[in-house]
Amino acid sequence: MNLIGLALWFPGVLSATPSRPALPQNFLPVPIIRQANTYSCGAAALAAVLHYWQVFDGPETHLYERLETTPNDGTEPSRIVKVAREFGLKAAWKHRLNLEAIESALKKGETVILDIQAWRDEASEPVPWKDTWEDGHYVVLIAMDQDNVYVMDPAVASGYGYMPKQELMDRWHDYEDRGGMVRRYHHLAIFIRGKNSLKGFPTPLTRLQ
């Protein structure tokens, strides 16, 4: 998983406008973790989830070694699952999913990391999302409504983002090439659940020591 170049901008969702929907009230308050490097979206997404389940309070860089995150390859889905389990969380990844599967998990309070295509070159004739494969990116699902999905995107520092459901279906794919062994993933999600989630974000004020 390696994000090269600039990530596609997902507008922060603060209030509804004619062109921008409102964030659903029942969203999961996953902390916003800005990825430190172009290749570290997987580590940042997992860090946000670990913060949400209150089992980790360090930076994403402290996860690189455990995740085997590298500039060339990013982070494998299986490593995210393994490290989440090491922190005492229940975790599994599945692919060939539909929207109903991730919405069901969301309603159960599970955190869901999606593996999507993040951006494409708009300078030339745009390539359809279904034909875009080189810009894999992890985001954390926080809410869904009738029209859109809402995510914590590690490439966006200022707030949460959204995209239409149909666009997600077109962008929701990626591949891994490890030592010449290529694996293609369609509609892959990582499901993670813990026991003690944050009740809001940001959290109440902390007295500095």
Image (spheres, helix red, strand yellow):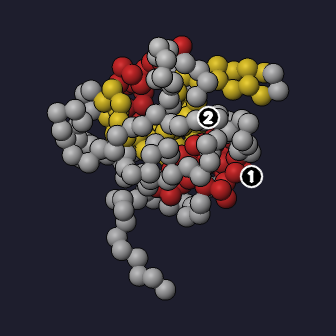
State which tag comes first along the sequence, 2 or 1.
Answer: 2
At label 1, counting other C-alpha atoms closer than 10 Å, the crowd grade (few under 14, some 14-19, many 20 or more) is few
Give the number of the disc on residue 86: none
Q: Nearer the viewer, mark 2 or mark 1?
A: 2
At label 2, counting other C-alpha atoms closer than 10 Å, the crowd grade (few under 14, some 14-19, many 20 or more) is some
Please name whichever residue, 42 or 4, is drawn nearer the observer in this view of the structure.
Answer: 4
Q: Which residue is mark 2?
A: 4
Q: Amino acid at mark 1?
A: Glu
Relative vertical location of residue 11 with respect to residue 66 in this rendering, above or below: above
CB contact under 8 Å: marks 2 and 1:
no
Local secondary structure at mark 2: loop
Q: Residue at x 50, y 46 (%)?
A: 154
Horizontally, residue 179 falls left or right of residue 204, namely right
Q: Residue at x 45, y 82 (%)?
A: 208
Q: Which residue is mark 1?
A: 65
Which residue is at the far left? Answer: 18
Local secondary structure at mark 1: helix
Q: Amino acid at mark 2?
A: Ile
Please say whether residue 31 is visible from this viewpoint: yes
Relative vertical location of residue 187 with respect to residue 56 in this rendering, above or below: above
Horizontal and vertical percent position of residue 120: 51, 25
